[in-house]
Image (cartoon, rainbow, N blue to C red):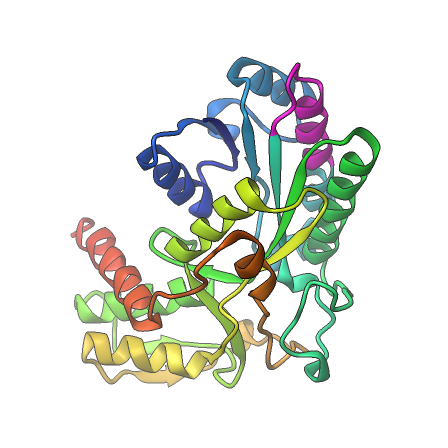
């Protein structure tokens, strides 16, 4: 199958492109690095027309929530206008492709009484990022309802793995632990609130869920890609420390505080599993963290 991935230079896009290539698909990697900035409608139209994809995985756009608070306009240009540009280019092809739009679980109403979050759980975005991703879903449904474009949407929970930006918690812990283990940093780790629980899934399980959602999901529908299990940040940190066999000082600087954040967030993956045959989040958490730790050791070690 001819496949186009937007945001292909990002964490998930990089892993997805490799996965699909290994399955034998003809993958076109689109990103600002390749001249396909989704905020530029002409560039998107040219990229889509040239690759003539049978499937599009739309992953482009910034994903770090604090960035969206610093520049909401840029967030909406990338996620909202970018999605319009991609879907418009797709529907104008002679044979419109199936399109997957990657939204976020961050938009769910943070109500502990409604856990685990299901696809029909109300949404109440609390950041510009979550609002923009919620708008992406509305755009996907509208293009499906208006023009019959086969758009499937997924809500991603916390997918983790090698190559992730160290501003995200699993990668941050892994980088700090690796630096200590290599003797590059003092035995001191900075953390936020370790009581917080989130739904962490391995990147390999996540991209398989993304693939199956595009190939087998029902157009116009949305699917959670979740583990179905909350894990405390304290558990992640403890697993890292055991893997590295270190006992550093743990500190919580003010700049890592997230006042008002929901203490527990996790999702129900049963809809995607029952409708597409996705096996779910089957990779053990310690295996995911070990891969992240080893990746950071290699990356930091190469700088010596």
Q: Is residue 304 left or right of residue 36?
A: left
Q: Position of residue 39 (x, y in %)?
A: 66, 30
Name the residue located 66 percent from the left edge and 17 percent from the top edge.
Answer: 93
Give the number of callouts.
Answer: 0
Q: Quadrant of the N terminus?
A: top left
State the residue in front, 271 or 131. 271
Q: Is residue 252 left or right of residue 245?
A: right
State the residue in front, 228 or 72. 228
State the residue in front, 127 or 276. 276
Task: Give yes or no for residue 68 being in the magenta stretch.
Answer: no
Residue interval drawn in magenta: 81-97
Q: Position of residue 198 (x, y in %)?
A: 53, 74
Q: Is residue 272 left or right of residue 251?
A: right
Name the residue located 55 percent from the left edge and 47 percent from the top edge.
Answer: 213
Name the residue located 57 percent from the left edge and 39 percent from the top edge.
Answer: 60
Q: Position of residue 269 (x, y in %)?
A: 56, 65
Residue 82 sits above or below residue 177 on the image: above
State the residue in front, 186 or 138. 138
Task: Give yes or no for residue 90 being in the magenta stretch.
Answer: yes
Residue 90 falls in which quadrant of the image?
top right
State the predominant SS element of the stretch in magenta: helix
Q: Is residue 67 visible?
A: yes
């Amino acid at each position: 199958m001819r496949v186009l991935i937007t945001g292909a230079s990002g964490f998930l896009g990089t892993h997805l492109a490799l996965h699909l290539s290994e399955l034998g698909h003809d993958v076109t990697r689109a990103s600002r690095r390749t001249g396909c900035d989704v905020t530029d409608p002409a560039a998107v139209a040219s990229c889509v027309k040239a690759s003539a994809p049978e499937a599009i995985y739309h992953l482009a756009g910034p994903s770090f929530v604090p960035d969206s608070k610093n520049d909401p306009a840029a967030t909406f240009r990338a996620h909202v206008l970018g999605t319009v540009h991609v879907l418009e280019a797709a529907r104008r092809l002679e044979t419109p492709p199936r399109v997957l739009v990657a939204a976020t679980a961050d938009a769910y109403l943070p109500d502990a009484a409604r856990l685990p979050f299901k696809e029909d759980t109300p949404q109440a975005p609390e950041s510009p990022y979550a609002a923009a991703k919620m708008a992406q879903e509305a755009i996907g449904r509208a293009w499906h309802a208006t023009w019959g474009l086969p758009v499937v949407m997924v809500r991603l929970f916390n997918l983790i793995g090698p190559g992730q930006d160290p501003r995200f918690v699993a990668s941050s812990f892994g980088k700090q632990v690796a630096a200590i283990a290599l003797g590059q940093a003092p035995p001191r780790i900075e953390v936020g609130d370790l009581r917080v629980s989130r739904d962490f899934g391995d990147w390999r399980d996540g991209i398989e869920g993304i693939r199956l959602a595009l190939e087998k999901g029902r157009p116009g529908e949305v699917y959670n890609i979740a583990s179905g299990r909350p894990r405390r940040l304290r558990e992640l940190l403890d697993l890292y420390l055991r893997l590295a066999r270190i006992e550093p000082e743990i500190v919580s600087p003010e700049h890592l505080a997230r006042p008002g954040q929901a203490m527990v967030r996790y999702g129900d993956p049963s809809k995607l599993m029952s409708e597409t045959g996705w096996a779910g989040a089957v990779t053990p958490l310690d295996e995911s963290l070990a891969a992240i730790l080893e990746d950071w050791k290699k990356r930091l070690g190469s700088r010596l």
